Amino acid sequence: MKDFTNSKGGFSLLKAEGISVVRDGITILNDVNFTIDKGEIALIIGPNGSGKSTLFKAIMGLIEYRGRIVLDDEDITRKKPHERFRKGIVMAPERMRCALDLTVEENIEISGKFEDAVKIFPELKKLKNRKVEKLSGGERQMVVFSRALISNPKYLLLDEPFQGVSDEICNRMVEEINKRRKSTGITIISHDKIEEIAEISNKIYLMVAGKIRKEFSGDEVKKLEKYIVI
């Protein structure tokens, strides 16, 4: 899975430098640093409350933070969320943000063509006229995931994308992520388990209490057993 890594002489596509977030006197992120190269898939794991979702919000510019975020060698620290979106940063959040009173088709067409989403999940065709509020958690997750992918992101942030989906749907999501790694400059996935995605990940970051404690390559899964249950 190292065909697309850019560690030899290439520029880094995403760099976080000293990212810290403090809310009401409580440190949520503490000096987070990482560099992810073009074409890489990075997995961020850690227990609930470790700061994974907060890190994604910082990358999107949705919250205030200290530190720097660099994309394509451009400092975007002061860029607003809509400016980051225009640069191709797309996030599929952990909490499924769909318009509940709209149909599946209407929700998906906010981001692109419904037909493109059906190519990812043919099941959506039968659900096209159903209101999202009537969907199961796994079905909503398919809507969120397909919406993110059909917008053709350059930087894809997936926060707990496999939550509530069946093993079969999870496997198809992993295949889709891996298939698109050439066209998507970078994919970062937040997840509290690693068995679903580790084998296609270039880097695995272990986050605990708002700080990245360890970095592993995708083939070092066994070393993680001492840190987290897998």
Image (cartoon, rainbow, N blue to C red):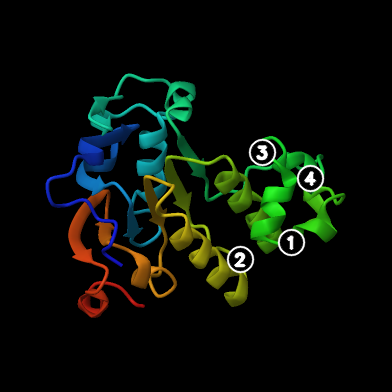
**What percent of the width, then of the height, locates residue 125?**
80, 57
| Lower sequence index among marks 3 and 1 | 3
Is label 1 in contact with label 4 (beta carbons under 8 Å)? no
Per the image, the residue denoted by label 2 is 164
Q: In the shown orientation, is residue 196 left or right of residue 94?
A: left
The type of residue carrying mark 4 is Glu
- Could one spot residue 220 in this view of the protein? yes
- Could one spot residue 67 in this view of the protein? no
- In this rendering, which labeled residue sits more in front, label 3 or label 1? 3
Q: Which of the numbered marks, if any, corresponds to residue 115?
A: none
Is label 2 in contact with label 1 (beta carbons under 8 Å)? yes
Considering the image in quadrants, where does the C terminus appear? bottom left
- Which residue is at a point 24% across and 80% down the rendered structure image? 222
- Marks 2 and 1 sit apart, C-alpha to C-alpha, by 9 Å
Q: Quadrant of residue 206?
A: bottom left
Question: Which one is nearer the viewer's eye here, 102 or 114?
Answer: 114
Q: Which of the numbered marks, if any, corresponds to residue 112?
A: 3
- Marks 3 and 2 sit apart, C-alpha to C-alpha, by 24 Å
Q: Outermost residue, right direction?
A: 129
| Lower sequence index among marks 3 and 2 | 3
Per the image, the residue denoted by label 4 is 105
Neighbour tally class for label 1: few under 14, some 14-19, many 20 plus, Cα within 10 Å: few
| Lower sequence index among marks 4 and 3 | 4
